Amino acid sequence: MAYFCGRTLWVHIRNRVSCNTPQQMTALVLLVVNLIFAVTATAQQTSALTLAEAEEIALEREPGQVAYVARAKALVDQSVAAGQLADPQLRMGVANFPLESGGFTTEGMSQIQLGIRQAFPPGKTRAERTSQFRSQALEMTENANARGRDVLTAVRDAWLETYYWHQAIQLLTESRPFFDDLVTITRSLYAVGSKDQQDVLRAELELSRLEDRLIETNRYRSQARARLSRWVGAASNRPLATQLPSWQQLPTVEVMRTSLVTHPSLSAASARIDVRRAGVNLAKESYKPGWALDLGYGYRDGTLPNGTPRSDFISLAVTVDIPLFRKNRQDRSLAAAHNERDAAIESKDELLRRLNSQLDAEYARWQDLLRRIQLYERLILAQAKDQSNAALAAYQSEAGDFADVMRGYVDDLDIRLDHIRLQIEHAQSYAVLANLGDLPR
C-alpha cells in the first residue's frame, strides 16, 4: 500500500515540478521518501489492534519480567562469588623493639615481621552457599516465566473486555434508529387519535434509557481501554480487530492437570525448597570448625657475639574454631533452617492444591459457557427476535399492547448483548486455562 502511495506521489510531484539540477532531484527524492514513511506510519497507527499483536506488545520487555530476569542474573553472579575463598590478609609489623635504650640491632629478638593469613570456612560451606544462590537464581527465572503467563492472561482479559464494550456501543448505536422510529410513529398515531399518550411516553422513556446506556457503556469502554493501556501503551487507542480468537477446543482436564505440574509457579516453589534445603546444609556445616593458616617471616638485623649475622625467623600457625557453645547458636540456626524448609514444602503443596482447584472450577465454567453460547445460538436469539416481531405485529393489528412491543425489543437487545458477553467470558476463561495448562498461543 505504501509502495503504490509513494509511486503516485512521485508521479504527481514529478509532473508538476521540473528538476533541472542533481541537487533538485536529490531534494525531490528525499521529499518523496519522507512522504512514504509518513503514509506508512499513519497506516500503522490506524490499523486494527489484534489480540496477537497486543500480546506481543505486552510481552516485549515487560518490566516485571525483566526485573525477575535481572535478579536471576545477579544471583548467578553471587553464586560464583560465594564459592570463592576470602581474600588473604597481609600482616606487617615490628616485634620486640627495645624502648629504653638501643635500636633495632641491640636486642636479639627485635624483628621486622611480614606475614600472610588465609581463612577457610567450615566444611562445605562454600559449595552449599553456591548451591543456595543457584537455586535462588532458578526461582527468579521461574518467577519470570510465571510473570510472562500472568501478563499474557491479563492482556487477553483487558483486550477482550475492551472488545465487548466496543461491540456493545456498536449494537446500541445500531438500535437507536429503531427506537427513534418508534417515538416518531407513536407521536404520529397519537396526533391522529389512534393511540394513547402513554405509548408516546413509553417510547420516549426507552429512547432516553438507551441514551443513558450509551453514556454508561462509553464510560466502561474508556475504563477498559485504560486497563489495556497498562500492557500495550498508546496502542490501546487504536481500533480493535473485529474477530474474536477461535478458542473452541481444549484438552481433557486430566491432560491439563498433567501439564499443571510443570507450571512455573510450582517450579519456583520447588526451587524455593532447594534454597531452604541448602540453608539446612549450611546450618549443619556450622557445627564443623573453620580454620585459618598463618605464615610469617621475621627479619633480624645485627650479629651474634661471634660475628655471625643473626638468623631470620619463619613461623607457621593454624587457627581452628572450637564450636563449644552450640545450644543457642548452631542448634537454633539448624532448627530455624528445618522450619523454613518445612514451610516451603507446605507452601508448595498448598499452591498445587489451589491451582488444581482453580483448574477444575475454570474448566467447568468454560464448559458451561460453551453450552450457554450454543443454547443462545440455537434457540434464544431466534426466540427473542420472534417475540419482538410478534409483539409488534399484534400491536399493529390492535391486538396487543405497546408495552409488550417495547419489552420485546428491549429484551431482544439485552439478549444480543448477553450473547456477546458470553462469548467474551468464554474467551477469558480459555485465557485462564491457557495459563494453567500451558496451552499454545
Image (spheres, rainbow, N blue to C red):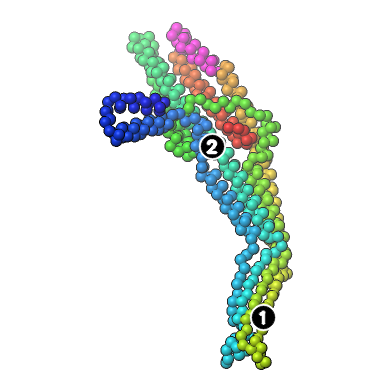
Residue found at the very far front of the displayed protein = 21
For the stretch drawn in magenta, the main secondary structure is helix
Examine the rendered structure and indicate whether residue 68 appears above or below residue 357.
Answer: below
Q: Position of residue 198 (x, y in %)?
A: 40, 17
Q: Earlier in the sequence, mark 1 or mark 2?
A: 2
Examine the rendered structure and indicate whether residue 423 appears above or below residue 80.
Answer: above
Q: Classify residue 236 by image quadrant.
A: top left
Q: Nearer the viewer, residue 211 or 302?
A: 302
In magenta stretch: residue 397: yes
**Which residue is rendered at x = 36% and y = 33% of the image?**
33
**Which residue is rendered at x = 53% and y = 26% of the image?**
244
Q: Position of residue 272 (x, y in %)?
A: 65, 49
The span from disc 1 to disc 2 (Cα, nearest Å) is 73 Å
In magenta stretch: residue 94: no
Q: Amino acid at mark 2?
A: Ala
**Which residue is rendered at x = 62% and y = 68% of the image?**
88
Q: Amino acid at mark 1?
A: Phe
The quadrant of the rendering that contains the C terminus is top right
Q: Nearer the viewer, residue 28 or 40?
A: 28
SS at badge 1: strand
Q: Nearer the viewer, residue 152 or 314?
A: 314
Left or right: residue 23 compared with residue 231: left
Residue 154's mark?
2
The quadrant of the rendering that contains the N terminus is top left
SS at badge 2: helix
Left or right: residue 71 compared with residue 396: right
Residue 313's mark?
1
Which stretch did the figure color magenta?
380-401
